[in-house]
Image: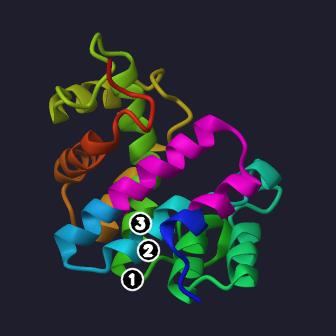
Amino acid sequence: MKYTREESVSFFREHNRDETHFRHALAVEAAMRYFAGLYGEDEELWARAGLLHDIDWEITQSVENGHPVKGGEMLREAGYEEEIVRAELAHGWEFSGVEPISVMEKTLYAVDELTGFVTAVALVRPSRSVADLEVKSVKKKWKDKTFARGVDRRVIEKGAELMGEPLERLIENTIAALRPVEREIGLGA
């Protein structure tokens, strides 16, 4: 069954009440839509995969409690496309055992953590915006291991490698993807 964006947002909100989680979902949705456009892929499918990738987070709270496997089950039971189920499972493949194979799966794996990192960098800037954010600023914070220490930089680097993209280009495209939705994800003045 193919769900609309509005139905997918409702499904996400039904299982996730925290506004921070919703903003992260919107950021990953925007990044996935952007990358789908770059690769000539189905933007709506990719965007739904990004939006729903953490559908189970407020239920599981951790990989030890079943994330992302529980999310895959939830999406499958709701009737989402198998490509979305696989992408959700593959974004946490170290725990689900579902290795990212498709371009969509590899992209979700890479941009999930990266959207969080880029957002964190933007939030400490005077503008609190991605409008004026440059790759060099992200790379500078990247080297500071005390900054956004919850973000697993190795996952992002592995994702870039899986995608065959230099890390700098992945960062540049992720910044560009977030610019149109910065207000919705809590950025900007």
Q: Is residue 86 above or below residue 31?
A: below
Q: Amino acid at mark 3?
A: Ala
Distance from label 1 to label 3 (Cα)? 15 Å
Where is mark 3, residue-wise? 47
Q: Amino acid at mark 1?
A: Ser
Where is mark 1, residue-wise? 102
Name the quadrant of the N terminus.
bottom right
Q: In the image, which is nearer the foreground, mark 2 or mark 3? A: 3
Where is mark 2, residue-wise? 105
Magenta residues, start to end: 9-32
User: Where on the picture, by quarter, is residue 140?
Assistant: top left
- Seen from the viewer's position, the closer of residues 156 and 134 is 134
Disc 2 or 3, which lies upstream in sequence?
3
- The residue depicted at 61 percent of the width and 73 percent of the height is 89
- Seen from the viewer's position, the closer of residues 123 and 158 is 123
Distance from label 1 to label 2 (Cα)? 5 Å
Q: Secondary structure at mark 2?
A: helix
Name the quadrant of the C terminus.
top left
